[in-house]
Amino acid sequence: MAKHILQSLEYLSRNSKLLTLLGLSLVLVGAVRLHYSPTIPSFRLMEIGVILAVLPHIPISRPLAEQKFTSKRIAQVLVGALVASFLLRSLYNVVSPLPAGADTATYMFYAAYVAKNLESIPAILFFHTSPYSIYFEPFVWIVFGVLVRIGFPLEWIPQILVPLVSTVTILPFYRLVARFKGTSVALPAALLLSVAPLQLRFSLDLFRNVFGNLFMICAFYFILFERRRVPWKSICLVALLAATYQPSFLLFLVTIVAYLGFGHPPNGSRRNLLIALIAMIPLGVPAYLGTGGLVVSFLHSIFANITGLLHGPFDWQRGVRDASFPFSWSFALVCMSIPLLISTRRRDFFFFYVASVMALVALFVLGTGYGERWGDFVEFGIAAYAGQQLATSKKGRGFLPIAVAWVFFESVTFIHEFYRPCIECFARYGRLAHDLGLHWPFQD
């Protein structure tokens, strides 16, 4: 089937008139559909139509993979990507009276609560003996609480801190892609990721995800490439990842074990992973492995949901919707990465990463109904393949700005659809903050 798809795409690419006609037809169908049904599929039809109509007219040039990039040029591209990323992630919350997202108010309340009760951090985060205990991974809450305690404005967390951490993640992602696929692939991949819509999804109100993504990409890099007798960077990053967001940690473990077992990892990678995991054992008590600990609770919830699945009807409609949500929003990157994903013969690291995401999506759609949260991670893998597609194509140099604009357009539609504050959430937590004497700068 993959061979037939590639042959069809190759045939279309050789017939510019047919490709242009098909593109214009899809634009017309999308425009008509948009008039009657202003939904995302209408935009996607128009997007595909525009790309197909424009693609035949992009001049052929030397592929990016055959060009050399100076250090100055690399720095310029990365700085541009970082600036665009930060502005895209922060601008809405800067100009809006209230930050966007349904969970943002929860993060803000507990940041203010932890800031006022720093001496009670063990009771709040580890032993759960406080009336306002946080049954989540502790790292983000400690960081937020300490920063607010020393004078960091609470409203700057969604406006500056979270967008900044999300933006910084582009740098280790660039380094990881460059080590596996080269600079010519890493640069367009970093540009695409800087304006990608699922990165906005993380920045919207999944703040633990944002920190977890940074530590996950860094942990991948140092587990695979650190060459020290004691790999302390790998140890620290794996520990921080486990203390930040367990889904990111689980994805890290599944990917790295699959790649080390079936791929072609660099020498020393298995040793780094083993040392990092052994070093984490004392960190797992009591917060992770004790009664009511995070890992125990996490595994219990999975088991309970899978048990419920075996004894009750499964909502296939919801399952398919949850599983397809990330791919429908990051549609441009999916389209650009699919040709390489289905044709590549050498299974590199990013193939194992995408395969691990898909396996976890399937497992959790069946077991818990939250496959969408796992699918959000796929963007790192498909951005690397999209960058490779642009770097190796003879039209990649001319198509790169169009590809970035395409991904950016999808991010704009995501902001339009989802970036709005939960007024009732801020009102509810505002009353609670007032009763507890907490600083609450958000006025609904």
Image (cartoon, helix red, strand yellow):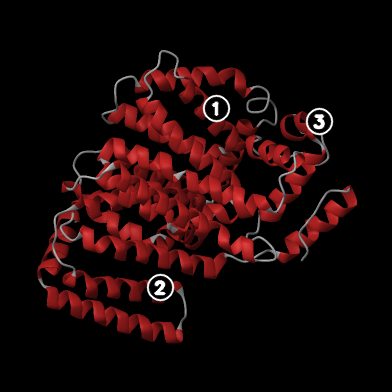
At a point 35% along the width and 37% down the height, the residue shown is 176
Q: Secondary structure at mark 2?
A: helix
Give the answer, above or below, for where 254 lies relative to 53. Answer: above
Q: Of label 1 and label 2, which has the lower sequence position?
A: 2
* Image point (75%, 39%), residue name: 150
Q: Position of residue 319 (x, y in %)?
A: 48, 57
Farthest top residue? 229
Q: How many marks?
A: 3
The residue that mark 3 highlights is: 119
Helix, strand, or loop for circle 3? helix
Q: CA distance from mark 2 to mark 3?
A: 51 Å
Under mark 1, the amino acid is Ala
Q: 409 and 376: which one is in front? A: 409
Mark closest to the chain's N terminus, 3 or 1: 3
What is the spatial separation of the Cα atoms under label 1 and label 2, in whole angstroms? Answer: 41 Å
In the image, residue 194 above or below residue 13: above
Q: Which of the two discs, 2 and 3, labels the residue nearer the N terminus? A: 2
Instruction: Name the secondary structure under disc 1.
Output: helix
The mark closer to the camera, 3 or 1, is 3
Q: CA distance from mark 3 to mark 1?
A: 23 Å
* Residue shown at the point (46%, 82%) measured from the top left: 37
Which picture quadrant has residue 32?
Answer: bottom left
State the residue at coordinates (19%, 51%): 392
The image's mark for residue 239 is 1
Disc 3 to disc 1: CB gap under 8 Å? no
222 relative position to 133: left or right: left
Identity of the amino acid at label 2? Answer: Pro
Given the image, on which type of amino acid does mark 3 rest? Glu
Question: Is residue 98 in view?
Answer: yes
Q: Which residue is mark 2?
A: 41
Q: Position of residue 97 (x, y in %)?
A: 70, 66
